[in-house]
Image (cartoon, grey):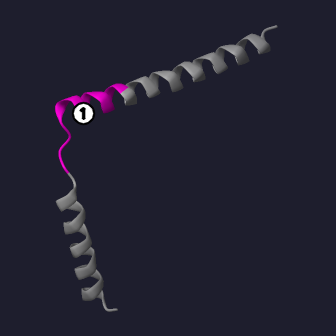
Amino acid sequence: MNLMQTIDDFVKQSKRVIMITYKPKDAEYRQMALTTGAGMVLIGLIGFIISMAAYALRHV
């Protein structure tokens, strides 16, 4: 395969992917944002609890 063939294949595959994707609806976007935010808060809370436990163990 030469370079032009590789580029052409990539462009064809990219067009196919773009054709099957869609813009999320408002409700779907809100659900993704809420789920992502909840995950970030949960990970932060777990990190905070671990940090506090490590602090407590060092000062006992």
Circle 1 crowding by C-alpha within 10 Å: few under 14, some 14–19, many from 20: few
Please say if 7 is above or below 51.
Answer: below
Between residues 58 and 34, which one lies in front from this camera angle?
A: 34
Is 7 situated above or below 13? below
In the image, the segment drawn in magenta is: 22-34
**Residue at 26 percent of width and 28 percent of height:** 30
Q: Position of residue 44 (x, y in %)?
A: 51, 23
Relative side of 57 to 48, left or right: right
As for residue 24 lying within the magenta part, the answer is yes
**SS of the residue under disc 1:** helix
Q: Position of residue 60 (x, y in %)?
A: 82, 7
In the rendered structure, which amino acid carries the disc numbered 1? Tyr
Where does label 1 land, which residue? 29
Corner quadrant of residue 21: bottom left
Residue displayed at 24% across by 87% down: 4
60 up-or-down from 34: above or below: above
